[in-house]
Image (cartoon, rainbow, N blue to C red):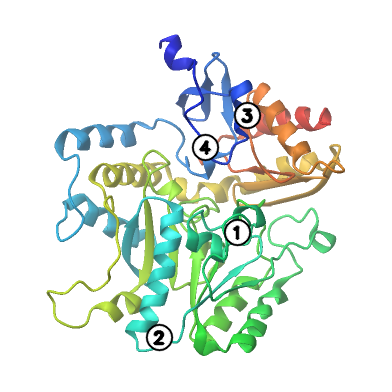
Amino acid sequence: MSNRLNTPNDMRAFWMPFTANRQFKKEPRLFVGAKDMHYQTHDGRQVLDGTAGLWCVNAGHCRPKITEAIREQAGELDYAPAFQLGHPKAFELANRLVDIAPEGMNHVLYTNSGSESVDTALKVALAYHRAKGDGSRFRLIGRERGYHGVNFGGISVGGIVSNRKMFGTLLTGVDHMPHTHLPEKNAFTRGQPEHGGDLASELERIVTLHDASTIAAVIVEPVAGSTGVLIPPKGYLQKLREICTKHGILLIFDEVITGFGRLGAPFAAQYFDVKPDIITTAKGLTNGVIPMGAVFVTSEIHDAFMNGPEHLIEFFHGYTYSGNPIASAAALGTLDTYKEEGLLTRAAELASYWEDGLHSLKDCPNVIDIRNIGLIGAIELSPIAGEPTKRAFSAFLKAYERGLLIRTTGDIIALSPPLIIEKHHIDELFDKLRGVLKHNI
C-alpha cells in the first residue's frame, strides 16, 4: 500500500465526527487494514479490537461470506429504486430478519443508520396513533442519559446533554424519565443491578402530568450503551412494559447496540423476555460493513396503515437507499455468518469468563465502578478534578499505544468486542487494560 494511502499529507478537509479534531490531526491514529479480531495501523502495528469497531463489527473484520456477497451483488445489481419498485434481496432479508426477531415482530422498514432507525420509529409511532383515530397522542418520552442517534428526533428523546445543548429547542412535546444509574447502591454489580427497578414508576408520574391520551410512545435502550453502559435494574423493563400497555402507549426498544447477539440472544427483547412494539436496529445488521438499519414493528402497527384505496401510498416515509441491493447482500452475508458460527448466542457462552476478567480490574487505581452484561462491559474512573473526561481519554490513548482499542464516554471505558472473541483474546484485552490503568494519571 502506498505511503499516500497510509499517511495522508493533508487532513484539513475532513471534519471528523465526535472527535477532538485538533488533537487527532497533530498525532493521527489511522487504521489501514483489519482481519478478524485485529486492526492494522498505518505504522504497521496490530491493535486488538475491544469495541467491535463502534459497537458494530459483531462477526469480526473482513469475513469472507460478507465480502463475497458484496462483491457478487456489486457486479449484478448495484442499485434499484425503493419507491414503487424493488429487488429480491430486500424481501429475502426482511423474511430472514423477522425469523430471528421476537415473536410478533413481523414487518421491517429499512434505513441507513441507527439515527435514521430512531427517527423512523418515532414517526411510525406518531402516525400509528393518527391512523387509529387517536391523533391527540403526540408526546414522546425518552430517558435521561439515553442515546438515540444524532438526528433531531433522536437528540430530542435522548438525554445526553452535550448532544442536545447546542441545537435549540428540538422537538416539542418531549419529556424524559430519570436514568437508572445508582452507583451508591449498585457499584461493581455483576449483571443486572438489584436496586432501581422502581424507577420505572416515574413513567406513571409523567402520565399523570400530561395524561396518557397525549403520549404516543416511550423509547429506551434496553442497555444504555453510548452513555457508559447502564444496565437495567431487575424488573425495570418489565414494569415499563406494564405501564405502557396499561395506558395504550407504544414501547420502543432502541437495539442499535444490543441487537444481533450482543447479550447472548439475537435481541435484548428476547434476553430480557420483554416484548416492545417497535425495535430499532443498525450496526450489527451488516457487521458495520455498509450503512444499513432496520426497524421492526408488530403486525398490529403495520396493519393499521393498510386501509383505503390500494393504489395510494400508506406511509409517506422512506429513503433513497432503503433496502439498497449491496447493503441487503451484506446483511444476508452477515446473517449467514452469524448462523453458521452460532454468533447470536455466543455471548451467553463467554459471558461468565468475560465478567470475571472485567471485574478482576476492580483493584486498579481510580476505578470506582465496573458493570457488565453479555459481552458488554464498563469501567468507570474517578474524574480528575476540574478536568472531566481527561482520565479516560488518557487511558484510550495509552491503550492504543499498547495495541488495544477501547471506547470512552465521559470518564467511562466501554468495551464490546466482536462476538468471535476467544478466551485468550479476553485475557490479552484485560492484561493490556490492567497495564494501562496501573499507570494512568
Q: Is residue 260 above or below residue 48?
A: below
Task: Tell me how far mark 3 sits from mark 1, CA to CA.
Answer: 32 Å
Residue tagged by mark 3? Answer: 22
Task: Of the two numbered discs 1 and 4 on the same chain, state the one appearing first in sequence.
Answer: 4
Check residue 10 in the rendering and tell me which mark sits there, or answer none: none
Structural distance between the alpha carbons of marks 2 and 1: 31 Å
What amino acid type is highlighted by mark number 2? Gly
Q: On the rendered image, what quadrant is the N terminus found in?
A: top left
Q: Secondary structure at mark 1?
A: loop
Residue type highlighted by circle 4: Gly
Q: Nearer the viewer, mark 3 or mark 1?
A: 3
In three-dimensional space, the C-alpha distance between marks 4 and 2, rounded to whole angstroms, equals 41 Å
Mark 1 neighbour density, 10 Å: few (under 14) some (14–19) many (20 or more): many
Residue on which the image places disc 4: 53
Name which residue type carries label 1: Val
Examine the image and state in which quarter residue 224 appears: bottom right
Q: Position of residue 49 (x, y in %)?
A: 56, 32
Q: Please report the residue visible at 55 percent of the width from the left and 13 percent of the height from the top.
A: 43
Label 4 sits on a secondary structure element that is: helix
Query: Residue sitting at 85 percent across and 43 percent down?
Result: 386
The front one of 197 and 169 is 169
Give the foreground label among 2 and 1: 2
